[in-house]
Every structure is written in structure tokens, then in C-alpha cells.
Amino acid sequence: MRDTARARVPAQQTRKVSRHSVRGQILDALRAALVEGELVPGEIYSGPALGERFGVSATPVREAMAQLALEGAVECLPNRGFRVLTRTPRELAELAEVRALLEVPVMLRLARTVAPEAWAALRPAAAATAHAAVSGDLAGYADADRAFHRAVLALAGNGQLLLVADGLHRRSQWPLPGAARARRGDLVADAAEHVALLDALVAGDLPVVESLVREHFAGA
């Protein structure tokens, strides 16, 4: 395993972050780097090296990394830094199963009770995923994808559901080690499923809603 605790990131990969709300911006930047595969599973990164990469001190990096450790993305290594945890296909399959167990019943209930115009109001959220997909923006698509699913589940009026579902969704977006960068065509197809889901919800077609949600999670 290559230890990159003291590695210097090439200039073309550098993202500078302003001093305003530094910790939150660093956390967002690290999450984007995870989704895009810039932080490699199994490798070790130090707070000072990442701070140099983002143009900040090591302190907000360590604070952001501590949050990522709580989310299961990295592990803390005393006096060394943080190792990006390695995912397995089984873990992703388990996440898809849990998401389906949690969200399918909720969406079926909402399909029976929510007015069509409420679903129509979510069209812009679906369009945002399509825009990110066409541009090939992996991090942007991940954010838009979670925003769409949050908007759907928010209609259930359960804040705890949103917290749990969003956490599971985020973890399912971290790539497998050695996985190829997601192709734009795959993102476009995934985004199209959001539109199809809204169409089925507007129509109150419960079998199609259930089928689409399960297939969507399985392909996540």
C-alpha cells in the first residue's frame, strides 16, 4: 500500500477554498474528492498535505476528516493521518437493500396520498440531476441526486427519515477501489429514472413506482 501522508498533489488537482466557513467548505471538497475518486481507497493522507492542497491550515482539514470518519469514509491513524476506507461490492449491495427497505414503503404511501401538483413541483430537482449528468460532473450529480431524493422523502414530513436516508445515500455514492470513472451515459440514464419516477408518482402507478425505485437503488 502506498503511503501518501507526505505526498504533494499536482497543481492541476488543487482546489483553493476561501476562509469563510472553512470547515464546511473543506468537508464539501473532501466529499467531492471521494466521489470523484481523487482520494484513493486504501491510501493515507495527512492533514498538512491536504491543507496545502486546499490552501488552508491543517486544523479545518482534520475537523472535516473527523466528520468523514463518523460517516464511515475514512479511519483515523494516530500520528499518520487518515486512510480512505476500501469499499466492497457486497457493502454497496447491502446499502442498496437497506435503502430499498426504508424508502420503498414511504414512496408507495406518498404515491397514494400526495397530490399530483406536489410531484410536479419536483420537476426542477429532477432537471438539476439531468443537467449535472449531461455535463459529466460527478460531484455535482451526487449532490443533485441526493437533493432530489430528499425532496421526495421530505413530503413524508419525517426529519429523522431524511437524516438516515441521506446518510445511506451518501455512503452509496463512494466508488469502489479501482472502479472506472462513471460514464456520462450512465449518469444520464440514472437521471432519466428520476423523471420516470415522477411520472409514475403523478399517475399513482404503485407497481411502476416500486419497480423503478428498486431498480434505481440496485444500479446506484
Image (cartoon, rainbow, N blue to C red):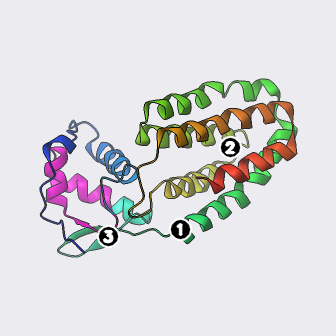
- Foreground mark, 3 or 2, reads 3
Bounds of the magenta segment:
41-65
- Identity of the amino acid at label 1? Pro
Q: Residue at x 16, y 52 (%)?
A: 9
Percent across and percent down for residue 203 are: 85, 31
Q: Which residue is mark 3?
A: 42
Q: CA distance from mark 3 to mark 2?
A: 34 Å
In the rendered image, residue 52 lying in the magenta stretch gets the answer yes
Q: Is residue 174 above or below residue 190?
A: below
Q: CA distance from mark 1 to mark 3?
A: 15 Å
Q: CA distance from mark 1 to mark 2?
A: 26 Å
- Foreground mark, 1 or 2, reads 1
Which mark is first along the chain, 3 or 1? 3
Q: Which residue is mark 1?
A: 89
Under circle 2, the secondary element is helix
Q: Which residue is mark 2?
A: 153
Number of marks in the rendered image: 3
Percent across and percent down for residue 39 are: 30, 57
Percent across and percent down for residue 60 are: 24, 52
Secondary structure mostly seen in magenta is helix
Considering the image in quadrants, where does the N terminus appear?
bottom left
- Identity of the amino acid at label 2? Leu
In the rendered image, residue 61 lying in the magenta stretch gets the answer yes
Under circle 1, the secondary element is helix
